Amino acid sequence: MRIWTFILLGIACLVAAPVVVILTYLVIPSGDVWSHLAATVLPGYIINSLWLMLGVGAGTLILGVGTAWFVTMTSFPWRRFFEWSLIMPLAVPAYVIAFTYTGLLEYSGPVQTYLRELFGWSSVADYWFPQIRSLPGAIIMMTLVFYPYVYMLSRAAFLEQSVSVLDAGRTLGRNAGSTFVHVALPLARPAIVGGLALALMETLNDFGTVEFFAVDTFVTGIYRTWLGLGEPGVAAQLGSILMLFILALILMERWSRKGKVTYTVGSYKRLPRYSLSRSGSAAAFFMCLFPVFFGFILPVGAMLAWTVQTWAYVDSRFIQMALTSLYLSGITAFIAVLTALVLSYGHRLRPGKLNSAAVRMAGMGYAVPGAIIALGIMIPFTFVDNFIDGFARQYFNYSTGLILTGTWTALIFAYLVRFLAVSYNTVESSMAKVTPSMDGAARTLGLSASKTLFRVYGPIMRPSLLTAAVLVFVDVMKELPATLMMRPFGLQTLAIRSYELASDGLLKESSASSLAIVAVGIIPVIMLSFMISKARPGTKKRMPST
């Protein structure tokens, strides 16, 4: 059984290595470049990052918590439609919605063109229009696509509320608003903070939106310092400071749950819904409609229209990029699920403190921005590539080239580090439902631990393994910073194509690749919506008591 401990520790060390590499630069002396950055652009990185976190945090809390309460605890028109549609913006990457709204709201876009025709304006000097490519614009774009993190966890917390507590609030004369503020909100606070932490981590990880909107943050600074100035060490120091922001978010989420344990009593009763007045129903309807319309319906509709207009731009290169994206996503999903299955099973066989720590280390990559992971991988991988090539040249008079960084190897490893936690959480929750008696039966039949894993657990957990693979597949399709920074020469994906075309001002031409990414992203969103709707105990008929 000790072999499983070694396997778990080996995987944990590999996955944690990029983060360790970055953190070591906190104690490495820096040169003049770092001093120059610290005196010029670093304050801007910090200020912009803080404003982004503050704005996106406030927006996601208002939209996520408010809509979750309305669809869970009140009755109003189209409530069932909003239950699942409020998750749909999660399928749209932040950089895609940024490109789309820029195309809609820029000077030559349909909105300003229509306003000029309507009011007879001839130039931009005749009127004022808000600048979409700005810090407030980035906050709005991220809020529209990141609020579902808060919505999902908040709704799950509201679904798990104790009916007895709600009935006590009704007995005391509390209406829907008072119950929400004084009863439901305090009980759901740990889940809400957890969703907020996820939204803020995605905010700090974003590259495409802030780069396109010319908002300087740590991620854009890492990209420019590494690829523009050719200073990976200084870029790593920027990454280490960004890691402190991430650590603060993790500690905030842990602190929100510290010492707060709630017990659900009477949870197997159907949740009572509050009846709203006509004005209250209208407010609930429009509050839920706002993020669905502006976060999904309008941008997807615009992308569909532009894709039809620019269909001639979809050529063989587009097909090749789509296939490359599918291959990368498929390979990573397979490796991630297999690794998660081994991690979960090894932890099940050897549930000690050491293995538990190893599993937590292996899952830390999801909290780390893709730019940091890319940098933490490229620094040691480049060293290994150069060492192997130098050794081969010296002793065999043969150049091996860039075996790791010049192929898909380093890029797929970066994806694995980034999204292993996604597959592990799904696989681990499914494995927990497999009874220990099955292990005993397999051993009685003479199966080893590895054969038991693939012959017994694999078929039983097939639906969850497929779910985990789909989640990783979609995340890899959407990932931009790691792909942009680590791609081998000549590699193009749908995400890179969309970003490059939009950066060149070809916003309509970028819609086809953006729409393809969104179409793939809808699949796990529908799955998540279905699972949340079934999360309330007691929604199905209970077995009669005997």
Image: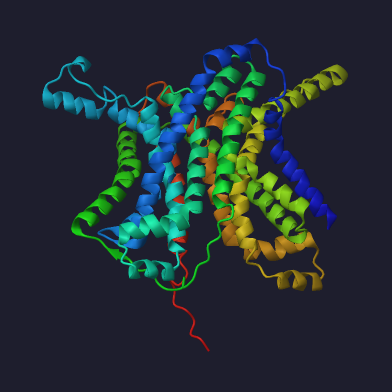
Q: Percent from the top left, x then y, of residue 467?
A: 55, 55
Q: Percent from the top left, x then y, of residue 150?
A: 44, 48
- The correct choice, above or below, for 315 with respect to 355 in the image is above
Residue drawn where x is 35% and y is 43% of the image: 296
Residue drawn where x is 27% and y is 26% of the image: 109
471 or 57, which lies in front? 57
Left or right: 137, with 381 as reference point? left
Q: Percent from the top left, x then y, of residue 3?
A: 83, 53
- The correct choice, above or below, for 80 with respect to 63 in the image is below
Residue that sits furthest to the right in the current view: 395
Residue that sits furthest to the front in the current view: 172
Residue that sits furthest to the bottom in the current view: 546
Question: Colour scheme of this structure image?
Answer: rainbow
Location of residue 242 by image quarter = top right
448 or 181, which lies in front? 181
Q: Does residue 313 show up?
A: no
Residue drawn where x is 68% and y is 63% of the image: 457
Q: Does residue 127 show up?
A: yes
Number of numbered callouts drawn: 0
Left or right: 114, with 324 as reference point? left
Location of residue 280 by image quarter = bottom left
Residue drawn where x is 72% and y is 35% of the image: 17
86 or 479, which lies in front? 86
Q: Percent from the top left, x then y, of residue 381?
A: 72, 28
Left or right: 288, with 163 as reference point? left
Q: In which quadrant will I find the N terminus?
A: bottom right
Location of residue 238 by image quarter = top right
